[in-house]
Image (cartoon, rainbow, N blue to C red):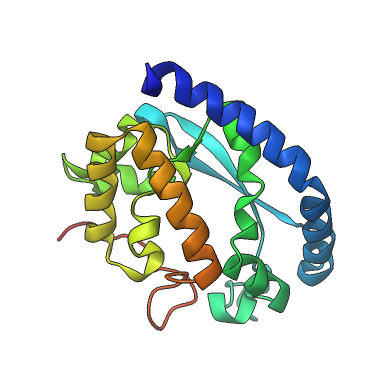
Amino acid sequence: MYKQFLKPLADRLVALIAFICLFPVFAIVTLLLIVANKGDAFFTQARPGYKNRIFKVIKFKTMTDERDTDGNLLPDKDRLTAVGSFVRKTSLDEIPQLINVIKGDMSFVGPRPLLVEYLELYDEAQIRRHDVKPGITGWAQVNGRNAISWQQKFAYDVWYVEHQSFWLDIKVLFLTVFKVFKAEGISAEGQVTIEKFKGNN
């Protein structure tokens, strides 16, 4: 009952209310990023969701598109703006994903939606992270976020799939608020963003 009916209904209702309440913040951050990025404030990308169905995730764009003389994107640390860094640190970059929740592509709690190219790299256990809708936050995020290894992250994701419940979701949401205030696990050690997953070998 909870997984199939109550959670999807609550997700959409709460996301709609949250988006309306946060719209002033949404508008201000959008304007600041347009100036900082000298262009787009939003980042959209195809991601696999429930049962590997592809959807477009929406986030605030925290890095510019600056390139070197050969046309290659500069390293992440050189493209991350001061505004973008603040937006990432405070997790404000997740606000646009409320739109994904309203549309039914995502949930508040679930494994984070990752790159489509990772689908062929998962082992039989790891692919189970797609047996539930992806989330804005998840069990892996409150247990290390980007500061843990990919294998640890996937193990947490699969554990969540196997133990999903109302009370676990409430626990994840409360822990997420705590982690955001402490700004823990935003990046892997020595990295601005986490390195790409390259498989289990």
Estimate the x, y position of residue 40 in percent, counting from the top left. 77, 57
Estimate the x, y position of residue 149 in percent, counting from the top left. 27, 66
Q: In the image, what residue occupies the spot 68% across and 73% down?
A: 66
Give the vertical position of 64 relative to 121 (above or below).
below
Residue 8 appears in the picture as rendered = yes
Judge by depth and name the residue closer to the eye, 186 or 166.
Answer: 166
Residue 114 appears in the picture as rendered = no
Q: In the image, what residue occupies the spot 18% across and 57% down?
A: 200
Judge by depth and name the residue closer to the eye, 145 or 31.
Answer: 145
Give the vertical position of 97 relative to 75 (above or below).
above
Estimate the x, y position of residue 32 in percent, counting from the top left. 82, 65
For this view, does 201 lie left or right of residue 154?
Answer: left
Give the vertical position of 93 relative to 69 (above or below).
above
For this view, does 114 lie left or right of residue 153?
Answer: right
Image quarter of residue 133: top left
Image quarter of residue 35: bottom right
Image quadrant where one finds the N terminus: top left
